[in-house]
Amino acid sequence: MKREYCGLVGISGHPEAARMAYFGLYALQHRGQESAGIVTWDGANLREQRGMGLVADVFNERHLGKELKGDTAIGHIRYSTTGASLLRNAQPFMVRFGDFRIAIGHNGNLVNAQALRRELEEQGSIFQTTMDSEVIVHLIARNLNGKGLEEAVALACSRIKGAFSLIILANNKLIALRDPLGFRPLSLGRMGDSYVIASETCAFDLLEAEHLRCIDPGEMVIIEDRCLTSRRFAEPAPTKSCIFELVYFARPDSLVFGTEVYSARKQMGELLAQEAPVDGDYIMPFPDSGMYAAVGYAQASGLPFELAMIRNHYIGRTFIQPSQDMRDFGVRVKLNPVRSLIKNKRLVIIEDSIVRGTTIRTRVKKLRELGAREIHMRVSCPPIRHPCYYGIDFSSKGELIAANHPVGDIARYIGLDSLHYLSIDGLLQATGRDVGYCLACFDGNYPVAVDGSCSKMCLEDKCCG
């Protein structure tokens, strides 16, 4: 199972900064449904509202209209990749240090967080959460003595390794930055004379903000009193942007890493049709993940496109669980087949990825029970054979089906007549460039070495710590 990780929003110089941050988070809700938070600067203090659940559940009119005062705000939505699912781990994370009130939001995962945490604890630091994001705050605080804020942030970032897009509110100053390899997206926009920061450009569309540009890897953007400055905190390096943003995570109406997500996913389907044509009655996705690649596959193959599985759009984060004998209820409640489209048909299912294969197996079993004559599956990314250490909650290597079984065995396990994955070359062609992406989950070539004291997951199936 893939889990969305985090989304970031920053607003500077707007009289309703909290409300704008709320709408920005609303647009980014797909990036995390576990918790949400907004912090504002009212001229003297930071004000916060954080809670577990969806954006619309965490905030109300009292928060946005009265309590979260100020013209500068940052917001964060989370699905934990490190740190337990607890309110104290909800972000933005706030601290007070000397004259500074600091709040920080983090998208990504640090591979040396545990080693840094042990080092800081030995030096007297006391941690309130289990998040690796708190490590960054302690490093900033330790460098603030005798140094300016930007220099303290730069020195802190020189110690951390892994994926980090950060948004920091320190009094009235808003700082946004990306790690030197640019794993996670972060963009700069403008509404009139106000600046906006967001993980994806779909947030700018909702706010009717102008998209100015992506924040560069290794760049720090500082916004204060409607004035923007930029500096580098790390030397330029070959980028390693997470290609799974384009495969799965980002909203299709966003620009990510300078690429239109919708077009890239459609192109993945078109190239998949070239690599693995199949004689079927129609093309179908399992909504919503395979939708856009399925459109491309159908158009390239000339086969009809059908929505033979219907998604229930009104499923909340939780629902009353049925008895044990209804063990597949959690899968069936989300998608239901159109029976008349299934019986005696040769189905070609387009999926964006297969992680463990258990959910897909249940869905394919249902299609067989309804009388499907043939079921072929085409996957719009290569086999996921290696865990991710940079912020995507892929299972350990032992749970990744493609890490332990050849394609033929996977097809038999799921119950398919045939299975084909898009090649790495095809995936790179679809994204419009052949360099600059992290492909570690496919090829095992990790651009940042994992700390030997253990990150969330290990290269082996056992913990090394």
Image: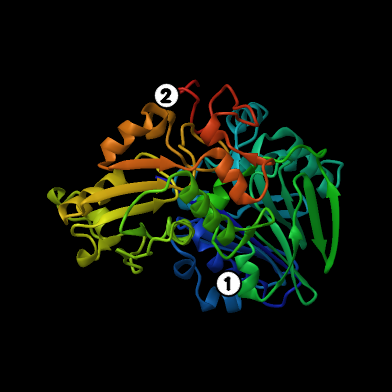
Q: Which residue is mark 1?
A: 23
| Residue 134 x/y as whole percent | 61, 43
Position of residue 372 measured from the top left corner of the image (x, y, whole percent): 21, 54
Relative depth, front residue between 186 and 61:
186
Examine the rendering and report whether any part of residue 60 can be seen. Answer: yes
Q: Quadrant of residue 180?
A: top right
How far across and down, in percent of the image, does residue 389 sit?
55, 35
Q: Is residue 359 left or right of residue 433?
A: left
114 relative to 231 in the view: left or right: left
Say which element carries label 1.
Answer: helix
Name the quadrant of the N terminus: top left
Which of 453 and 443 lies nearest the eye of the viewer? 443
Q: CA distance from mark 2 to mark 1?
A: 41 Å
Identity, as a three-letter code, of the amino acid under mark 2: Asp
Which residue position is annotated with label 2? 461
Q: Nearer the viewer, residue 90 or 248?
A: 248
The secondary structure type at the circle numbered 2 is: loop
Picture quadrant where residue 334 is located: bottom left
At x 81%, y 57%, the residue is 222
Asked if residue 90 shows in the view, the reply is no
